[in-house]
Structures are given as C-alpha cells and as structure tokens.
Image (spheres, grey):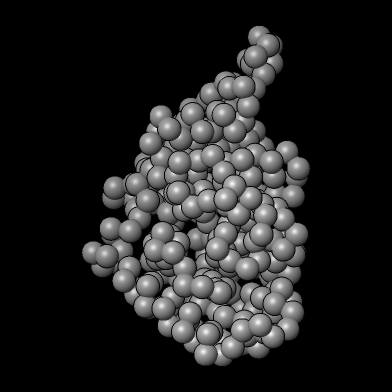
Amino acid sequence: MDETAQQTSYERVLVPVGDKSDPNNLTELASLLVDPRHGAVQFVHVTTDRSFVGSQEAWRTGSESVARNQHQLKQQGIESTGSIRTASSAVAGILEEAEEYDADAILIGWTDTDAISRIVEQLLRKADCDVLVFRAEEDPTDAESLFVPVVIPPDENRLRMTAILSQRAEAPVTFAYVVGSDNSEEDGWEVLEKSATGLEAFGVQAETELVHGNDVIEKLGELSADYDIMVIGTSRGWWLRKSLFGRKTDEIAGAAQCSILMHKWQGEVPPDAE
C-alpha cells in the first residue's frame, strides 16, 4: 500500500451493535475502513430500557454483543473498544457516543425493518460525521470489485471513502454512467472522466463504463451482477429525491445483485433537509 493509501483510511469508526447476529457483516466492513496501524473501531450498544430488571438484561446482552464483535476484530489485528449506553432513544445514544468518541464515521446495517429504517434516516440527517449504511450479500473482505454509478462527478469526500475501500480490500473501482432519453453520451463521458480523475488523486485508478438504457433501475441491476459492492450516495444523485428508504432507493436495492454501501459524507445534506 502506498503513502496515499495510508493517508486515506478512517481513524475512528463507530459501529452500533444489537444483541443478535450481524447479517450485514459490519465488523468485517469496519476492518476495511480503518488502517490497523493508526485506526480503531468503537462498538456501542444502546439501551432505552431504564427499569432495573430491563436495564440489567440489556447491559448483559449488550456486553456480550460488544465483546463478540471486539474479539472478531482483534483476530484481524485492529484495535477496538466497546461501551454500553442508556439513552432516551437509540439515535440519541449513537449520536452522543459519536460525539464523545470523536468518530470520523458511523457504520450501520441496512434493513427493511421500519424501526431500523427510522434510526438510519435520523442518523443521516443529524450526525456530524460520515454515515455509512451497508447491506451485505457476501463478506465485504472478500470483495474483488466496486461499482459506482454516477450522474455527476462524486464529491471529494465520497471519492476518498471509495478509495479507502478499494485500497484496503484491494478491489478495483468501475464508474458507470447510464445514457437515457434525457442525457447524452457526451455528458456521460465527461462525468466519467472527471470521476476517474478525482479518484486518481487518492491513488486509485478506475475503469469507466458507459451504457444505454431507458430503465435506469433495471440497467443498474443488470450491471451490478458483475460486481461485489455498489457504492451510492444519499443526495446529489437523480435516484434519491427524499430519504434513504425512498422509493427509488428501495428499487435500486431490490434490483441490485450485489452488496450495497450507501455513504453520506460529513456536512452533506440529504434532499429532504435542504
């Protein structure tokens, strides 16, 4: 890994954990987002049960979950810490922990459960750091390719995060642009060139792909079958007009044949909050 790669990794990643297994492989993804030489992960379990019996049980199960994830990360040579926090809500507890930990990023799983959906949506709007939402089809540490659909050149912050993942996983990046009825090949090649040039500044060479398709969701689904992780953003893209779990996003998730990583960089404003 070159010096540019060393400089791009996150230093402090916060991972909220529940009391059950992690279907989205967040611990594995966290191991890719930090460099073991100078990065660390904080696991937090938030309980809102303030009754004596309930809080005792919540702390027990939370401690077991945190310890399990810490042990898993330790096997990969990455420093981690853990905490149990009681708060008025899960979102409040996560945000409090992120502030105290001075987190660079919060990493949380993608699920269609309404309660989790609301938590994630609030984190996207309120967190003062990057937020990464991951839905795993397979272990991200086994990823061999990253797929990044674009309609405008990605922000520097998203390029940096993509570079981190690419460098740590040793997975090449492909930017893709879909030409439909309201855009042109000329527009597409310009966006692709700027995207690739931007990523190159972080030490990563990217491939580019321009395709035609009137149904963009369907085309993205077809293209995703050739990749391991699709990276998308929360705003500044044509597919997201409202919230994380808006109709377009759900359609992309439903059509995708690979894992999905949604990224909101610090300071980015989701469309509904603009």
Q: How many marks?
A: 0
* Residue 246 image point, x, y percent: 72, 55
Q: Nearer the viewer, residue 157 or 186?
A: 186
Q: Residue at x 68, y 11 (%)?
A: 51
Rendered-image quadrant of the N terminus: bottom left
Vertical arrangement, residue 153 with respect to residue 96, above or below: below
Vertical arrangement, residue 109 with respect to residue 257, above or below: above
* Residue 94 image point, x, y percent: 54, 33
255 lies left or right of 69: right
Q: Residue at x 55, y 79 (%)?
A: 176
Vertical arrangement, residue 259 with respect to residue 26, above or below: below
Q: Which quadrant of the view contains residue 21?
A: top right
Outermost residue, front side = 274
Q: Is residue 64 visible?
A: no
Q: Nearer the viewer, residue 95 or 225?
A: 95
Q: Residue at x 72, y 63 (%)?
A: 248
Q: Which quadrant of the view contains residue 114?
A: top right
* Residue 117 image point, x, y percent: 69, 45
219 lies left or right of 2: right
Q: Nearer the viewer, residue 238 or 217?
A: 238
Outermost residue, top side = 52
Q: Residue at x 53, y 84 (%)?
A: 188
Q: Is residue 163 visible?
A: yes
* Residue 52 image point, x, y percent: 66, 9
144 lies left or right of 91: left
